[in-house]
Amino acid sequence: MPPMQPVLEDERLLLRPLAAADFAPLFAVARDPEIWALHPAHDRWREPVFRAFFDEGLASNGALAVIDRASGTIIGSSRYDIRVCRPGEVEVGWTFLARAHWGGGVNRRLKRLMLAHAFEAGFDTVIFLVGDGNLRSCRALEKVGAVLTDRRQRWEMAGVMVDHRIYAIGAADFLAGPLMAGASPAD
């Protein structure tokens, strides 16, 4: 199994393994209800709900803290996982960012770093699970070149079964797609 908690960085972002000490600064980001408004776990802004999410991330050995290099602050997190994957696949998910970092290229940079690492580590395909109704995440994935598949996954969230769409991107499509096209320090 390739390393699922690498240190990845570019000019603006540092991704590093999530640590127990990250709870307070990450919860400071996560407690914004608007981040979770379209998410199936729409109450993840509440501390007990976020604590369970955070602890699961620590236990997964795939969670990463997303740090803004200019300020040195945690602005979100993301995660690698293989639990629902077919051979040759890895999932990138559980991503959230502070709203101040929406729409400014941070998600593109984050996905570029994580996908490049996944493909360099030998995975053929990266998948993304998106809860039905989370149109914001669907649009964000389409912007980075992920394609909606015919696969679906039911996932339990807070005791409720939630249907998820599965998006995917292969290595060749990643290299030829919008994340790499014209990739520069300015995006």
Image (tube, rainbow, N blue to C red):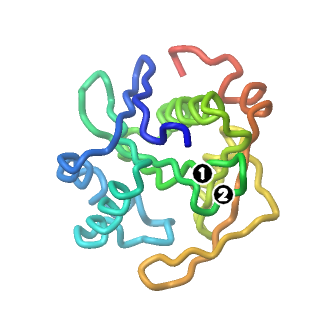
- Residue 89, percent across and down? 68, 48
Where disc 1 sits, the SS reads strand
- What residue is at 47 percent from the left and 76 percent from the top? 157
The image shows residue 112, relative to residue 95, as above or below, that is: above
Secondary structure category for the residue under label 2: loop
Is the residue under label 2 in contact with that under label 1 (CB below 8 Å)?
Answer: yes
Q: Quadrant of residue 19?
A: top left
Spatial distance from mark 1 to mark 2, Cα to Cα? 7 Å
- Count every numbered label the image shows and give the total: 2
Estimate the x, y position of residue 117 in percent, counting from the top left. 56, 31
Residue holding disc 2: 85
Residue 101 vs residue 140: left or right? left
Q: At x 50% / y 35%, what residue is drawn?
A: 110
Q: Residue at x 36, y 72 (%)?
A: 43
Residue located beneath label 1 in the image:
91
Give the number of the mark in front: 1 or 2. Answer: 2
Q: Residue 174's spot in the image, x, y percent?
A: 72, 32
Residue 80 in the figure: left or right of residue 23: right
- Give the answer, above or below, for where 64 lies relative to 160: above
Is 121 or 47 nearer to us in this picture?
121
